[in-house]
Image (spheres, rainbow, N blue to C red):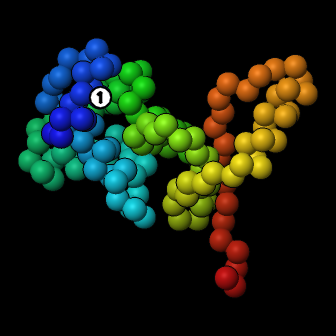
Amino acid sequence: MPAQDNAALRRTGLRITLPRIKIYNILVDKSKKKGDEHHLSAEQIYLYLHETGENVSLPTVYRVLTQLVSAGLVMRHRFDGRTVYELATKEHHDHMLCIESGKVIEFRDDLIEELQKNIAQKHGYQLIDHELVLYVKPVKGK
């Protein structure tokens, strides 16, 4: 495990355990691959572990993911009834989910961000955080 990733785990106050390291590394590795799917289900992470010969149970994967989410290292999303995880990033982004393929597309739009802040202010609130998921399907003929 790279030293900086180990440091990220240490900063959370979590004990450094082999399952935590392995699961966190999978999410770190997937987040670095451009165009690669990096919104992973617990079951996908479990399969990656077993493909590499790691003997980690599915309940352990769920428990570790919950701990990593609580520590702020990982984000949990619920898209159309399924739960997926991704490495937490400093830069906010929103998501589109293709209802035909299940593909998750990340995007950021400054106009949408500004509109959301303005709507909250109009109602007498300050926007702290949000999640936006657009459910989309391909346009036929394109």
**Residue 10 in the image: above or below residue 77:** above
Badge 1 is on which residue? 8
Residue 95 pos. (x, y %): 60, 50
**Could you tell me which residue is drawn at 24 percent across and 27 percent down?**
7
Left/right placement of residue 87 relative to residue 14 reads: right
Q: Dot 1 lies on which element?
A: helix
Residue 133 pos. (x, y %): 65, 46
Q: Is residue 50 visible?
A: yes
The part of the image, by quadrant, that contains residue 58 is top left
The part of the image, by quadrant, that contains residue 36 is bottom left
**Could you tell me which residue is drawn at 40 percent across and 62 percent down?**
34
Residue 108 pos. (x, y %): 63, 51
Left/right placement of residue 76 relative to residue 123 reads: left
Left/right placement of residue 9 relative to residue 101 reads: left
**Residue 2 in the image: above or below residue 103:** above
The part of the image, by quadrant, that contains residue 46 is top left
